[in-house]
Image (spheres, helix red, strand yellow):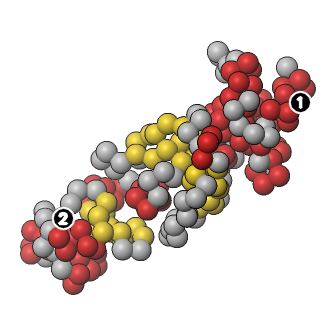
């Protein structure tokens, strides 16, 4: 156990792969012994995390490592921003068209968004418990726009609930929402109709 603890100091901070461990002088066998002793945790195929990082949001950490452009979207983004109460059973993540979604151990629903509009309303947030690790997330406005644009798969009620609760927030500006909808194809008409009903 003492030797394993000593080897733990050699490992990279945060998320690392088996090859990263080998580059730092930790063999496969030693890594597996550390895993069995609870010093490191396997979070996905060939990916591990050690020490305090084991309390991080491991699903998002795996996604951000395997797909750096992965962006929390639709129901998952709305739930994080709190315009809806639904807790999704899988994480909605978007990638720009042309990027192949990786296989993850986490429950993820991948969405492919147009490259031209991928960055509209996108920012990054820190992954809880993971030093310096970030993941993309869409703003509440972009998430509402996408919920209307993809209402066939996201569910019409998701957009309505998100819009209704967003409108109750101080400073919410329907004009700003419509301006964003004008940048994202197939969303402006359905969103305008919903605003006319709710306002």
Horizontal arrangement in the rendering, residue 42 relative to residue 177 (left or right) = left
Mark number for residue 31? none
Q: In the image, which is nearer the foreground, mark 2 or mark 1?
A: 1
**Image quarter of the N terminus:** bottom left
Apparent side of residue 61 relative to residue 193 in the rendered image (left or right): left
Which mark is first along the chain, 1 or 2?
A: 2
Name the one closer to the observer, 90 or 52.
90
Q: Label 2, on which residue?
A: 11
- Marks 2 and 1, Cα distance to the nearest angstrom? 55 Å
Q: Residue pushed farthest bottom?
A: 29
User: How many numbered circles does the render carry?
Assistant: 2
Q: Residue at x 65, y 56 (%)?
A: 111
Quadrant containing the C terminus in the rendered view = top right
Identify whether 107 is placed above or below 161.
below
Vertical placement of 25 versus 178: above or below? below
Residue indicated by mark 1? 193
Residue 197 place in picture, x, y as percent: 90, 26
Residue at the (74%, 20%) spot, across then down: 174
Q: Which sits in the foreground, 70 or 43? A: 70
Residue ranking furthest to the top: 171
The spot of residue 172 in percent (x, y) is 68, 19
Answer yes or no: is residue 168 visible.
Answer: no
In the image, residue 2 sits, relative to residue 85, either above or below, namely below
Q: Mark 1 falls on what kind of element?
A: helix
Q: Which x, y percent locates residue 81?
A: 59, 36
* Residue 30 in picture, x, y percent from top left: 19, 80
Residue at 43% x, 62% y is 66
SS for callout 2: loop
Q: How crowded is mark 2: few (under 14 residues within 10 Å), some or many (20 or more)?
A: many
């Amino acid at each position: 156990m003492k030797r394993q603890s000593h080897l733990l100091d050699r490992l990279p901070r945060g998320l690392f792969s088996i090859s990263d461990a080998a580059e730092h002088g930790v063999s496969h066998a030693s890594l597996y012994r550390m895993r069995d002793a609870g010093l490191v945790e396997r979070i996905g195929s060939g990916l591990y995390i050690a020490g305090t990082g084991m309390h991080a949001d491991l699903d998002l950490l795996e996604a951000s490592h395997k797909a750096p452009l992965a962006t929390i979207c639709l129901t998952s983004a709305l739930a994080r921003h709190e315009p809806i109460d639904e807790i999704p059973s899988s994480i909605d993540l978007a990638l720009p068209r042309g990027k192949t979604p990786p296989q993850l151990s986490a429950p993820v629903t991948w969405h492919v968004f147009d490259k031209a509009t991928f960055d509209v309303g996108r920012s990054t947030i820190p992954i809880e418990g993971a030093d310096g690790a970030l993941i993309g997330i869409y703003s509440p406005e972009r998430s509402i726009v996408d919920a209307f644009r993809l209402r066939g798969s996201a569910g019409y009620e998701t957009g309505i609930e998100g819009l209704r609760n967003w409108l109750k927030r101080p400073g919410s500006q329907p004009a700003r929402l419509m301006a964003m909808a004008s940048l994202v194809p197939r969303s402006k008409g359905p969103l305008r109709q919903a605003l006319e009903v709710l306002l």
